[in-house]
Amino acid sequence: DAKTTQPPSMDCAEGRAANLPCNHSTISGNEYVYWYRQIHSQGPQYIIHGLKNNETNEMASLIITEDRKSSTLILPHATLRDTAVYYCIGTNTGNQFYFGTGTSLTVIP
Amino acid sequence: NAGVMQNPRHLVRRRGQEARLRCSPMKGHSHVYWYRQLPEEGLKFMVYLQKENIIDESGMPKERFSAEFPKEGPSILRIQQVVRGDSAAYFCASSPQENIQYFGAGTRLSVL
């Protein structure tokens, strides 16, 4: 599975877009990129995933670079409830997710 | 459609006792995963099971830990002779196939 690198923490003003980067330079051609978040000590919540193309759903957008070495999760209008630890995960099997330490996002009023 | 159900939510055990954690996957999901999260750390994969089969247990400690997912009933993560270092949050996830994993609220195990 691809090793991912994320900044340890980020701040974002409420109402603004939050852009969370992830580096996965060792990702292979059949590895998906998944994003999850964990609010306080709750169970991780699935956000979005993709392989090559950019993806969008009701929660977020995922932008994957053409060389697939990095991606950005975009929360278009951050709210206080988006404060959480965000994990970027690379996997080709879908069975063993490596969560790493993630990015702690704080949304500021 | 109910989510992944884990119980108990909190479990307190004394050193040397057994801990039994239960996980009921989402309806229609036949894949179950267990993860452990120590304080201030990310989740660590433990084991992946399908009905009556252990598919990948590469993250399971070699001793005292076992997991099962019987044909009927919930998946069980069993920790025998618990020690203080076993204190952690244990999360279960399920999926309909090997893709998106949906997580339960976790069981917080405290070993006195």
Image (spheres, coloured by chain):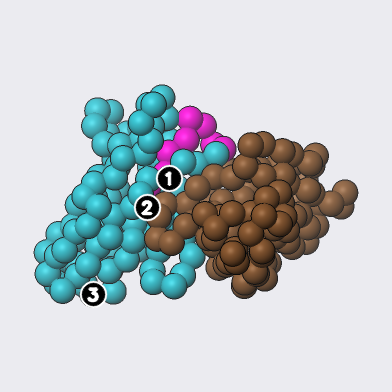
Q: Colour of chain A?
A: brown
Residue at left offset 51%, top offset 32%: B97
**Which residue has dot 1 on it?**
B103
Q: Secondary structure at mark 3?
A: helix
User: What is the quadrant of the N terminus of chain B in the image?
Assistant: top left
Residue type at mark 1: give it.
Phe
Residue type at mark 2: give it.
Phe
Residues under labels 1 and 2: Cα distance? 7 Å
User: What is the quadrant of the C terminus of chain B in the image?
Assistant: bottom left
Q: Residue furthest front?
A: A109
Residues under labels 1 and 3: Cα distance? 25 Å
Q: As drawn, is A61 to the left or to the right of A83?
A: right
The total number of labels drawn is 3
Q: As drawn, is B93 to the left or to the right of A20?
A: left
Q: Chain of mark 2?
A: B
Asked if the residues shown at circle 1 and circle 2 are in contact, with their CB atoms under 8 angstroms apart, the answer is: yes
